[in-house]
Every structure is written in C-alpha cells, then in structure tokens.
Image (cartoon, helix red, strand yellow):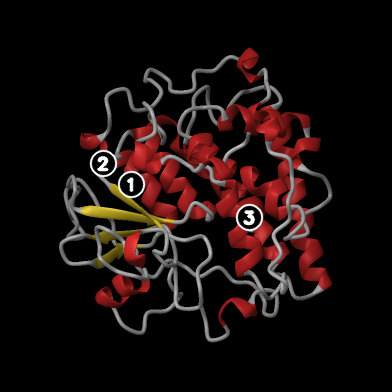
Amino acid sequence: MGGDGNKAYGHRTFRRSRSHFADRITADGRDGWPVQADRYRLVVSRACPWASRAVISRRLLGLEDALSMGIADPVQDDRSWRFTLDPDDRDPVLGIRFLSEAYDRRETGYPGGVSVPAIVDVPSGRLVTNDFQRITLDLATEWTALHRSGAPELYPAARRGEIDQVMAEVYADVNNGVYRAGFATHQKEYEEACTAVFRRLELLGERLSGQRYLVGDTLTEADIRLFTTLVRFDAVYHGHFKCNRWKLTEHPVLWAYARDLFQTPGFGDTVDFDHIKRHYYQVHTGINPTGIVPVGPDLGGWLSPHHRAELGGRPFGDGTPPGPVPPGERVPAQGRPA
C-alpha cells in the first residue's frame, strides 16, 4: 500500500504497479505450478474490477469446484486485504487474517504492495501469482481439463489478435484511465486522462452499435474486461473519480450493452454494489476524507430490458450458460439491484 497507506490516494501521481509475482499455473506445470483441482485458492474482493474479471471467468468456465474462492472485506486497511467477512476474521481455508501473510510466505520485502486477484497455493500457504492481466487468460486456456461441460471459449485462438488489440485499448484508456483521472494530482493530468476515457468509450459505443459483443458474435475476455469498469461507472467513477462528462445511463448503446452483460448468467450475479461503493468511498480517504458513502445511484435500471439480442450473437457460442451460483457465493441482497 506504500508508506502513507490509503491517505496517499490523490496526493501523488498515480502509477499502476506491475504484478511482481507473475508465475503461471499451467497444464504442464512449467513454472512449478501445475493445474490441479483443489490445490489453489483464488482470493478476491468483489469491489475490485481487476479481481472481478477472475470471479466472472471462474464462474463462466465452471471452475467453482476446482478452484475455491476467498472473498476479502471491501474495506482493507493499510496492512492489506482482510478476511473479516469470515468467522474469527480468518480465511477458512488458508487460516490467515490478512492476504499479506500469503505474500510474506512467498517473499519478504516484495515491491508493489498486496493486490487482488491473488492465487495462493493451499498446501504451502504461499502466493503463486498476482498477475491480474494473465490469470484470466490462463483460466480460459490452461485450465481446460477442469472446465465445466459447455464452458464458452473466452479466448479463442482464431480471434486472439483482435481480442488483444481491443483489450489493450480498453485497458489503457478505460480500465486504467478512470484511475488515472481519479487519482490525478494536477488539472492537466486529470483532463488528459478523463478526455481519453470518454474518447475511448465513444469509440466503443460506435463499435457496439452494430454488434452485440466486442469481438465476434460471442462473449470473450474483452467483454469481461470492459464490463468490470462499466458496471462501476455510475456508482463510483462518475462522481468519486470525476469521470463526469456523462453517465453510463446516458449513453444508449453502452448502457444497453452493459445491461445485456449484467443480465447474462456469470456477470451480474457476481456483482456486489455494496462492496463496490464502500471500498471506493471509504478506502480512498485521500480523495474522500469523510468516508461518506453516497446513497445513489438507483440500481433498478440494471434489470430493465436491453433489446441487444436483436443484434444476434450467441453469448456462449456452442456452449451453455453456467448453472446456479453456489450457495456460499451468492451476493447478499444489499449488494444487488432490487
């Protein structure tokens, strides 16, 4: 988190740290971490867009029984993400109170702080990877032996060049761009970041005006990565991060696209708006010193008709939707649209 912890947000130039722990869990185990059911635990926060990618991918691919998931409290302190949602304030599988304990078992004095998503080796309690850019790609391509029957191809080989290009643009201007705007320390820095956010969103809106999904006629990793920013846009980025040229609900194409995804099994059923709002407004004390969480926006619109199916497309390709959310992973009522 850095020496100044949460109070530093908004007081120093924002730079996203590269993932220090970039080992990969692969089918052949070439980094020493072979894909194996029940060996690893995915640690996430439902508040974090980077972690939410992994939550959605895991659910769409049906990896719930093979890769267990620990959910951290959305309000972390300066020590790290906490397991205060669990009995005795400890993760029931790893037995730790703070995610930093798994990091420390892997390496001491590591740079970049403690981030989610993180995958931990359960037998040793050691962190394996916090490479948020790679984790979901490997879930889609290296964990195939453990995918559910009917799992979609989220990173199809024939489309990877186009998917990678779209994801790179979305990451630079949108996923990371809202943070660059929100944590800017100078007017020019903020205006450049905010301008790039909305310029890219307009281009994405044009792209999506005639096709249901970003690449091809099925859901891909690109849609997951854009969705995790869009679903947070009006709730936190519009006000808290000052990305306020317009709201998502004011852009007909992107709002319909986001609702389409939200209502698709595996997307909206992983979203906890309560966690999202409390994390941003209570953790980023450098830009919201009072810690007050706004009561809005109204979430009811997320369940309204979107009519995107008229564009065609097959959400899961030749596959099928995921089944019901496991009971222990259901989002509490206060985090869902009424």
Q: What element carries label 2?
A: loop
> What is the quadrant of residue 140 in the picture?
top left
Q: How crowded is mark 3: few (under 14 residues within 10 Å), some or many (20 or more)?
A: many
Which quarter of the picture shows residue 106? bottom left
Which of the two discs, 3 and 2, labels the residue nearer the N terminus? 2
Q: Answer whether labels 1 and 3 touch (C-beta < 8 Å).
A: no
Q: In this view, does 123 lie to the left or right of 58?
A: left
Image coords of residue 220 (percent x, y): 47, 33
Task: Give the answer, above or below, for where 184 lies relative to 207.
Answer: below
For the residues bearing labels 1 and 2, Cβ distance under 8 angstroms: yes
Q: Which of marks 1 and 3 is nearer the N terminus?
A: 1
Q: Residue 277 carries which label?
A: 3
Toward which corner of the image does residue 118 lie, by quadrant?
bottom left
- Residue in the picture at 63% in, 23% down: 211
> Residue 212 at x, y = what percent?
61, 24
Q: Is 61 drawn above or below residue 297 in the view shown?
A: above
Q: Where is residue 252 in the image (x, y as percent from the top left)?
A: 77, 29
Kindly identify which residue carries mark 2: 143
At label 1, counting other C-alpha atoms closer than 10 Å, the crowd grade (few under 14, some 14-19, many 20 or more) is some
Q: Residue at horizontal 64%, vertical 43%? A: 230
Q: Is residue 63 left or right of residue 255?
A: left
What is the secondary structure assignment of the residue under circle 1?
A: helix
Quarter holding the C terminus? top right
Question: Identity of the amino acid at label 2?
Answer: Trp
Which of the pair 124/131 is nearer the observer? Answer: 124
How far across and how far down the image is residue 85, in percent? 42, 59
Residue type pointed to by label 1? Asp
Residue at 57% across, 39% down? 336
On residue 138, the disc is 1
Query: In this rendering, which labeled residue sits more in front, label 1 or label 3?
Result: 3
Horizontally, residue 201 falls left or right of residue 127, namely right
